Image (spheres, helix red, strand yellow):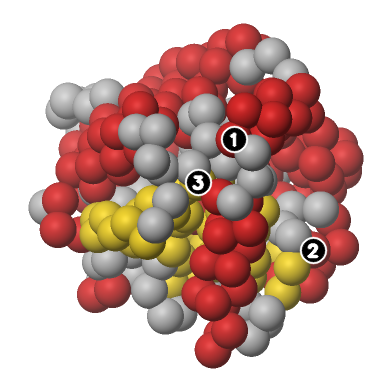
């Protein structure tokens, strides 16, 4: 349901809040579709100058909803909502700030590779168990993580599936700062407000220069998506996903 994504505007700031606390913000297709639409509308609105992603206390996102994964793994519709969102994320024209508290799994980690500033709380752990589930990295993380973390840091995150504490993530350059839980939203919104007050054209040019061409990122997301879809239908992934869901039950 789209009410699991709450959209709010505070001046020139557009806030996208993942709000499915009972499932620790596991993302469904409808949630991805709503976020894609919101990013597009915010980019098209000259009154909006910065996007903000937030979760709920204790959970930024636990990753993709595994029920959606199982539909694909058992031969159902692959759905395009996830990949549409990842492409939208790669192409966003305006700065993105995120505030992460607690659980940040899978897309809950990789989304921050696209953010210009990420704040996290001390209890946050970033983890990407793609390989453990018989899958591959997504969101362009196979390209972006080595740039940010170096080859071995990226392998630890994406290959080994090691959890990165907030302090380790900051030291590695994955996030900007670590703040206490009570100060998270205020810190995020203060930074977003500073960004929104900058001359927008100058900021856009500066951001584009820092990011460079997005062609390679868009191409990598497409390549990852092909492998991801194939892996979802593999015996290896079906077995891993079934075992994981059985353990959860």
* Label 3–label 2 contact, CB within 8 A: no
Q: Earlier in the sequence, mark 2 or mark 1?
A: 2
The image position of residue 75, as x and y in percent, is 19, 26
Badge 3 element: strand
Q: Nearer the viewer, residue 174 or 230?
A: 174
Would you place residue 83 above or below residue 106 in this image?
above
The image position of residue 228, as x and y in percent, is 45, 27
| Residue depicted at x 67% and y 35% | 203
Would you place residue 120 above or below residue 87 in this image?
below
The image position of residue 223, as x and y in percent, is 54, 15
Q: Determine which quarter of the picture holds residue 235.
A: top left
Q: Determine which quarter of the picture holds residue 149.
A: top right
For disc 3, the neighbor class at 10 Å (few under 14, some 14 to 19, many from 20) is many
Distance between mark 2 and mark 1 Cα atoms: 27 Å
Q: Is residue 37 left or right of residue 202?
A: left
Residue 23 visible, this orientation:
no
Q: Which mark is residue 50?
A: 3
Distance between mark 3 and mark 2 Cα atoms: 22 Å
| Residue depicted at x 59% and y 68% | 190
Q: Earlier in the sequence, mark 1 or mark 3?
A: 3
Badge 2 element: helix
Distance between mark 1 and mark 3 Cα atoms: 10 Å
For disc 1, the neighbor class at 10 Å (few under 14, some 14 to 19, many from 20) is some
The image position of residue 102, as x and y in percent, is 53, 75
Q: Which mark is residue 83?
A: none
The residue tagged 2 is 170
The residue tagged 1 is 200
Q: Tell us which disc is closer to us: 2 or 1.
A: 1
């Amino acid at each position: 349901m789209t009410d699991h994504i709450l959209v709010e505007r505070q001046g020139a700031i557009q806030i996208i809040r993942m709000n499915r606390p009972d499932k620790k913000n596991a993302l469904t297709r409808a949630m991805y579709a709503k976020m894609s639409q919101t990013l597009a509308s915010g980019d098209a609105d000259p009154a909006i100058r910065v996007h903000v992603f937030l979760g709920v206390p204790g959970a930024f996102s636990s990753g993709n909803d595994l029920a959606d994964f199982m539909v694909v793994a058992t031969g159902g519709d692959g759905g395009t909502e996830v990949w549409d969102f990842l492409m939208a994320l790669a192409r966003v024209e305006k700065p993105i700030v995120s505030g992460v508290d607690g659980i940040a799994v899978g897309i809950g980690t990789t989304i921050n590779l696209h953010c210009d500033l990420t704040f996290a709380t001390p209890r946050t752990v970033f983890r990407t168990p793609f390989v453990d589930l018989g899958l591959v990295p997504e969101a362009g993380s196979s390209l972006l993580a080595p740039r940010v973390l170096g080859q071995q840091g990226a392998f630890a995150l994406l290959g080994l599936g090691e959890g990165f504490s907030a302090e380790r993530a900051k030291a590695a350059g994955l996030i900007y700062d670590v703040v206490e839980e009570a100060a998270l939203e205020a810190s995020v919104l203060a930074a977003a407000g500073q960004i929104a007050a900058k001359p927008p054209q100058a900021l856009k040019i500066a951001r584009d220069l820092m990011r460079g061409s997005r062609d390679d990122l868009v191409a990598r997301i497409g390549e990852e998506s092909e492998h991801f879809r194939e892996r979802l239908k593999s015996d290896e992934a079906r077995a891993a996903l079934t075992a994981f869901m059985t353990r959860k039950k």
